Image (tube, grey):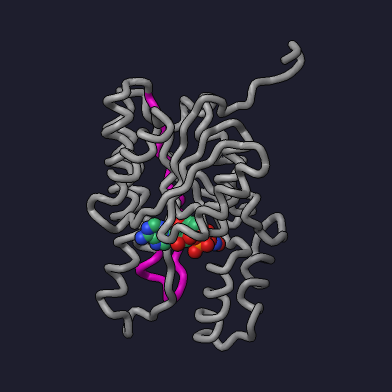
């Protein structure tokens, strides 16, 4: 290495990404690996998450894939244990797995409310708890990061369960920041906006239908309702996540940072 070259910003770090086979998880995983992290990728099914890891390895970076169900009491703890067995340490947990459905309150089965919370809120709690137990014992600080959403900060029709699950997540982030700060562990969430993904195609179809909109109309409307007036894509998200994993973010904790084209400004 010549004196002019800079070390990869995440060199030496081991990072878990849940929901790594999804649109945003894939983009985050690829970027963290390209920035020098060794990434442990976890998702429900081995095939898709294995494909993401293969793609990262083909690009010359370090990735390993496994399966997890973040709703199982022991799932995240097993994931942390397996990751440490594989890579020898842990530096950051990106609790990114999340699900959404469209359901008007008057018709929402309580089981549907619980299903959304079991992944988006309870699942992140389990991931944070499992990672924090290891990070505290390891004694070198670390990063707990959750994928929230601008949904945590605003209402939307037919998504009361999703909005509530993401809002509750911010309570977890703020409290965990207090509990783990003394260990040099920061805890943050990032809040994507309306990202062009299969999840948003589903919102466009199902919420759009309930609102009497033509296919594509709702997405175009929300995309145009921002200062930047551009469509958000998965690759908009990873640069912020990479920064939050890096040592440079050491003074940032308990935050919910929007990465949303400026749709929400608080
Ligand atoms: P996605 O559906 O493409 O990916 C989510 C991934 O999570 C999937 O691969 C799925 O298999 C996995 N998953 C679901 N349940 C799981 C479980 N119990 N255990 C382990 N993995 C599980 O969605 P995405 O658009 O990539 O969303 C990723 C995150 O970003 C979610 O938390 C979502 O709420 C959030 N988000 C998305 C948008 C958007 O516009 N797409 C906007 C804001 C926030």
Dividing the picture into quadrants, the one containing residue 112 is bottom left
Q: Residue furthest top?
A: 3
- Residues 182 and 118: in front is 118
Does 182 sit above or below residue 56? above
Does 82 sit above or below residue 159? above
Give percent across and percent down for residue 26. Answer: 56, 52
Q: Say whether residue 172 is left or right of residue 103.
A: left
Give percent across and percent down for residue 220. Answer: 67, 72
Task: Tell me if I can see residue 72 in this picture.
Answer: yes
Please give the name of the residue rendered at 53% of the width and 41% of the height, measured from the top-left corner.
Answer: 63
- Residues 88 and 265: in front is 88
Give percent across and percent down for residue 173. Answer: 35, 43
Please give the name of the residue rendered at 44% of the width and 41% of the height, measured from the top-left corner.
Answer: 16
Q: Which residues are magenta?
A: 141-162
Please give the name of the residue rendered at 58% of the width and 73% of the height, measured from the top-left corner.
Answer: 201
Dividing the picture into quadrants, the one containing residue 162 is bottom left
Does 107 sit above or below residue 74? below
Give percent across and percent down for residue 196. Answer: 63, 64
Residue 143 sits inside the magenta stretch: yes
The mark total stands at 0
Q: Residue furthest bottom?
A: 212
Q: Say whether residue 228 is left or right of residue 69.
A: right
Quadrant that contains the N terminus = top right
Task: Tell me if I can see residue 98 in this picture.
Answer: no
Please give the name of the residue rendered at 69% of the width and 61% of the height, measured from the top-left corner.
Answer: 231
Residue 226 sits inside the magenta stretch: no
């Amino acid at each position: 290495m010549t004196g002019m070259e800079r070390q990869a910003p995440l060199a030496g770090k081991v990072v878990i990404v849940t929901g790594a086979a999804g649109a945003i998880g894939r983009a985050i995983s690829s970027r963290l690996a390209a920035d020098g992290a060794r990434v442990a990728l976890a998702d429900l099914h081995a095939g898709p998450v294995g494909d993401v890891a293969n793609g990262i390895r083909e690009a010359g970076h370090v990735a390993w894939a496994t399966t997890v169900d973040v709703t199982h009491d022991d799932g995240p703890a097993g994931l942390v244990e397996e990751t440490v067995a594989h890579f020898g340490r842990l530096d950051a947990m990106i609790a990114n797995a999340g699900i959404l459905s469209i359901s008007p309150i008057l018709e929402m089965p309580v089981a549907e409310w619980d299903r959304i919370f079991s992944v988006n809120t309870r699942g992140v709690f389990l991931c944070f708890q499992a990672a924090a137990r290891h990070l505290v014992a390891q004694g070198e600080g670390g990063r707990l990061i959750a994928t929230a959403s601008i949904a945590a900060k605003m209402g939307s029709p037919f998504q009361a369960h999703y909005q509530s699950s993401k809002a509750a997540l911010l309570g977890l982030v703020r409290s965990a920041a207090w509990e783990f700060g003394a260990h040099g562990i920061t805890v943050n969430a990032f809040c994507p906006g309306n990202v062009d993904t299969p999840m948003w195609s589903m919102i466009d179809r199902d919420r759009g239908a309930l609102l009497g909109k033509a296919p594509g109309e709702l997405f175009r409307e929300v995309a145009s309702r921002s200062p930047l007036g551009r469509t958000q894509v998965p690759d908009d998200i990873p640069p912020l996540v990479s920064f939050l994993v890096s040592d440079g973010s050491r003074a940032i904790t308990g935050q919910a940072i929007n990465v949303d084209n400026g749709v929400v400004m608080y």
